[in-house]
Image (spheres, grey):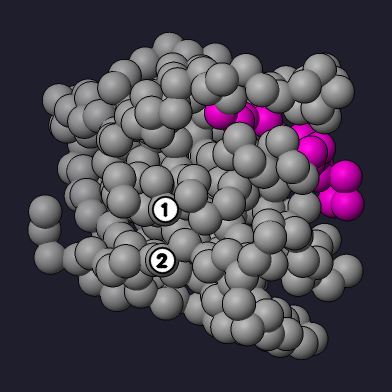
Amino acid sequence: MRNLTAEDERYMWRCIQLARCGEAGAAPNPMVGAVAVNKGCIIGEGYHRKCGGPHAEVNAIRSVRQPELLAESTLYVSLEPCAHYGKTPPCADLIVSCRIPRVVVGCMDPFAKVNGLGVKKMREAGIQVDVGVLEQECLRLNERFITFHSKCRPWVTLKWAQSSDGFIARQDGTAVAFSTDLTRMLVHRLRTRHQAIMVGTHTALWDNPTLTARDWPGTHPLRVTIDRHGILPPTSHLKDGSVPTRIYENGDIAAILADLHQAGVQSLLVEGGAALHNAFIEAGLWDEARVEIAAQRLERGIPAATLHGAVLKTEEQFGPNKICHYRPKS
């Protein structure tokens, strides 16, 4: 890769900015932004708006009012252009046909049908392709998609609420309403941003949750739980048929994640109790944790899971409660 300039980074930042506009519609495809630049001026830009629709590169190229300028322009794109026929034709073929001389790529696409083939096709056509501009930022943009294809499992978010002294329930297992109306609404928003939601047997049995996103507009996630001994009653909300649900008889976390991967589930929100959270943590099968900490104390009770080797990334205050976001230590 040649020496990159501040200008290259500036246009890649614009790609990232555009890509985020597709957050609501692109999934399960990645969010991607593209910018066409001619002699220091943006002449076209686009992003992937909706799964099944034109990709970012197509939208950027179509927006150019003088297509002849593409033959002397640079195309910036946050993710490697595709090289295969899916729901749309290969973007790499379109770029080649437009005779674009240079393409700058933020990061490679780990999807097996792309994974270097887009870059290879463009280079074989004589296009100068530079890869790795703002690479980490571009990877973070689609970390769920990247994890799904590179680790062959869904992105896992652990979520729970606890007292200020670290308990999730009273000593006898009685639930405590730690969340406020506002933070409860934020939980439902979080649910719409995951393709599946999981609780353990105890939570499914004693709390009888619906696990829907009823307080936020969006799609209800696939519901997932474990029932090794078949003790969930027919009256359980998880058996009401209102939302697609998977009930596993085997509690092997890795096996469950592998099965969800096979089903195309890219993101899983784990809302179960401490035992389930600790199982994910001990197995090293988690990617982020969202912990809501209430102002109230319980003095004693059932302790929350322990985030071994976690790094606090952000902390936000919502009235009396705060929400902390953690990531595993690299």
For image coordinates 44% across by 76% down, the residue present is: 313
Residue 238 x, y percent position in the rendering = 76, 27
Tell me: residue 172, above or below residue 245: below
Q: Please, which residue is most extreme toward the left here?
A: 2
Disc 2 marks a residue whose amino acid type is Thr
Q: Nearer the viewer, residue 251 or 328?
A: 251
Residue 59 in sight here:
no
- Assess disc 1: are there few (<14), some (14-19) or many (≥20) residues with their C-alpha within 10 Å of its C-alpha: some
Residue 288 in sight here:
yes
Q: Nearer the viewer, residue 272 or 79?
A: 272
Q: In the picture provided, is 51 more to the left or to the right than 179?
A: left
Residue 150 x, y percent position in the rendering = 28, 35
Label number found at residue 278: 1
For image coordinates 58% across by 51% down, the residue present is: 273
Q: In 3D space, how far apart are the residues under numbered discs 1 and 2 (Cα atoms)?
A: 7 Å
Q: Please, which residue is most extreme toward the front here?
A: 172
Magenta part, dominant SS: loop
Q: Nearer the viewer, residue 86 or 215?
A: 215
Residue to which mark 2 is pinned: 306
| Cβ atoms at labels 1 and 2 below 8 Å apart | yes
Which range of residues does the magenta coloring cover?
A: 208-226
Disc 1 marks a residue whose amino acid type is Asn
Tell me: residue 279, above or below residue 183: above
* Mark nearer the N terminus (1 vs 2): 1
Q: Secondary structure at mark 2?
A: loop
Q: In the picture provided, is 310 more to the left or to the right than 27?
A: left
Q: Secondary structure at mark 1?
A: helix
Q: In the picture provided, is 75 more to the left or to the right than 178?
A: left
For image coordinates 23% across by 25% down, the residue present is: 117
Tell me: residue 266, above or below residue 85: below
